[in-house]
Image: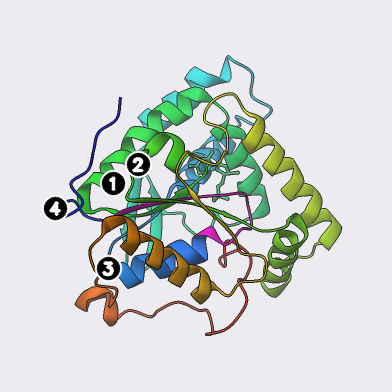
Amino acid sequence: MTHSRDTNKSPILIAIDGPAGAGKSTIARLLAERLGVPYLDTGAMYRAVGLLAKRQGLLPPYSDEAGPRLEALVIRHKLDFRPGEEGFRVLIDGNDVSEELRTPEASDLASAVSAVSTVRKALVPLQRQMAARAGGVMEGRDIGSVVLPNADLKVFLTATSEERARRRYAELTQRGVDTAQAEVLESQRRRDLQDSSRTDSPLQVARGSVVIDSTSLTPEAVVERILKELERRRETPLDTSGGDAVKSRNHGRLAHGSRLPAEEERF
Ligand code: DC
């Protein structure tokens, strides 16, 4: 079923999908600031479930029997997702776990739980609710295809696997994580394969998406390209000043003209 959106009344909704390391978080955050709408990080939601599962000793690989147990975790615990000036924060039973979600282990756990349908069924309605509240720039793997098929604009952001691994490696070493580039490339390959080959909502280019290869583009160039496309599709000029609340905010840690850092600058 398709629903049309009244773009003059509805808050702006942008879907950004793509593989790990493509620059989704950086671009989604910058765009959200320019448009004065919330930045919505659905990967963080799957990461939270992965962390909960680990705490309960529910480790991958997950068989069919794990589905109800993982679903029960989501229901039994209070998961609080808060888009705001401090980025997208995640609280589990009142405790902010946002930083804990940013480890390579959390990435692997998130990828594993995200392949379980009961987990997706529990999280997708929450994602739609967040988007309906105030619009936003939502990033993930199935946003354009499943969560927000009627977004004002769907973007599929990609980059070569070498460039994505290079960004991730640079970011990890900057954070003091001891790793090797080959290891990063291998774990990225594993996660890409898992995310794009699962049965439920695999990573794919949603119909109608603008595909952008960020390999040799600056974040600013990617953002400008998206804004131009958005304006063209909405057929109305956009206010990209970010709004008053946003203007006073730190506009991110990216230097102008820098290349995209690792997808999650937070890694
Ligand atoms: O975007 P991220 O790296 O934080 O996402 C972590 C994992 O969560 C990713 O490997 C796949 C999964 N994910 C998903 O299946 N669907 C989404 N909409 C977002 C993330």
Disc 1 target residue: 130
Residue in front for this viewpoint, 61 or 143: 143
Q: Nearer the viewer, mark 2 or mark 4?
A: 4
Task: List the residue tagged with mark 3.
Answer: 36
Mark 3 residue element? loop
For the residue with label 4, is its CB less than 8 Å from the closest atom of ligand 1?
Answer: no
Q: Secondary structure at mark 2?
A: helix
Say what secondary structure mark 4 lies in.
loop
Please say if the residues under marks 2 and 3 sit with CB atoms less than 8 Å apart: no
Q: Nearer the viewer, residue 19 or 80?
A: 19
Residue position for label 2: 127
Mark pair 2, 3: CA separation? 19 Å
Q: Which of pointers 4 and 3 indicates the residue nearer the eye?
A: 4
**Residue 180 visible in the displayed image:** no
The answer to whether the residue labelled 1 contacts the one labelled 2, judged by CB atoms less than 8 Å apart, is yes
Q: Is residue 34 left or right of residue 191?
A: left
